[in-house]
Image (cartoon, helix red, strand yellow):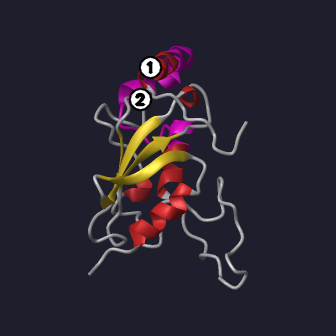
């Protein structure tokens, strides 16, 4: 049976303002790549390349998000695996989409006036990933050493995170909507 939801979700995700350069990797609609654009310092000094991999059984099986850009963050391990409870087998819901409609750059409205908007969905995978990067959460930890440093020596953690971002993050692309 052909996979239809990831290509549709890719179009929705491209309208979202939290990522750029979203595209299938190597022509595979079940593997997306792009740049995630955090909002908060120090991570907002750069962009972080990510990969979102969908199972052939999507939406019954959750996708997997991986950061391809190195980041100094307690919720991301050195291999780029992300602590994302939303995509765990226990918490995943097949109604979850890559991005939640009507949020962050979605222009809103319906084409032709007669189409109904998508029903509300649980928080979306890419938005949840961006939220994790913007706000390190002590409950979403893959690197205990960094979580301890953030808790015990926050000024040291944030300085190291800024240095790491400056060295490893990609240049943020310009906003297509202008300044």
Indicate whether 163 appears above or below 59.
above
Q: Judging from the image, what secondary structure is the residue with disc 1 in? A: helix
Between the C-alphas of marks 2 and 1, the distance is: 7 Å
Q: Position of residue 81 (x, y in %)?
A: 32, 42
At x 26%, y 81%, the residue is: 1
**Which residue is found at the position 31% from the left and 31% from the top?**
78
| Residue 18 appears in the picture as rendered | yes
Assign a secondary structure to mark 2.
Answer: loop
Question: Looking at the image, can residue 97 be seen?
Answer: no
Residue 164 shows which numbered tag?
A: 1
The region drawn magenta spans 131-160
In the image, 51 versus 144, the foreground residue is 51
Counting from the top left corner in percent of width and height, residue 24 is at 36, 55
Q: Main secondary structure of the magenta part?
A: helix
Q: Which residue is mark 2?
A: 71
Which of the pair 135/28 is nearer the observer?
Answer: 28
Near mark 2 (Cα within 10 A), the count class, few <14, some 14-19 or many ≥20, is many
- Magenta-colored stretch includes residue 153: yes
54 above or below 79?
Answer: below
- Mark 1 Cα shell of 10 Å, populated few (<14), some (14-19), many (≥20): some
Q: Residue at x 28, y 35 (%)?
A: 79
Q: Dots 2 and 1: beta carbons under 8 Å?
A: yes
Q: Taking 77 as reference, is 178 left or right?
A: right
> Which numbered marker is on residue 133?
none
> Residue 15 appears at what percent x and percent y?
58, 57
């Amino acid at each position: 049976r052909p996979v239809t939801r990831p290509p549709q979700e890719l179009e929705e995700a491209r309208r979202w303002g939290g990522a750029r350069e979203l595209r299938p990797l190597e022509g595979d609609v079940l593997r997306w790549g792009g740049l995630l654009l955090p909002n908060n310092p120090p991570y907002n000094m750069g962009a972080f390349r990510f990969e979102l991999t969908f199972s052939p059984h999507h939406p019954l099986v959750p996708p997997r998000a991986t950061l391809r850009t190195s980041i100094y963050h307690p919720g991301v391990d050195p291999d780029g695996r992300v602590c994302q409870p939303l995509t765990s087998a226990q918490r995943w819901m097949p109604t979850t989409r890559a991005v939640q409609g009507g949020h962050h750059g979605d222009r809103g409205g319906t084409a032709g006036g007669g189409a109904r908007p998508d029903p509300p969905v649980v928080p979306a995978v890419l938005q949840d990933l961006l939220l994790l990067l913007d706000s390190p959460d002590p409950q979403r930890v893959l690197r205990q050493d960094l979580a301890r440093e953030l808790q015990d020596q926050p000024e040291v953690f944030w300085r190291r995170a800024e240095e790491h971002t400056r060295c490893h993050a990609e240049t943020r692309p310009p906003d297509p909507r202008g300044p």
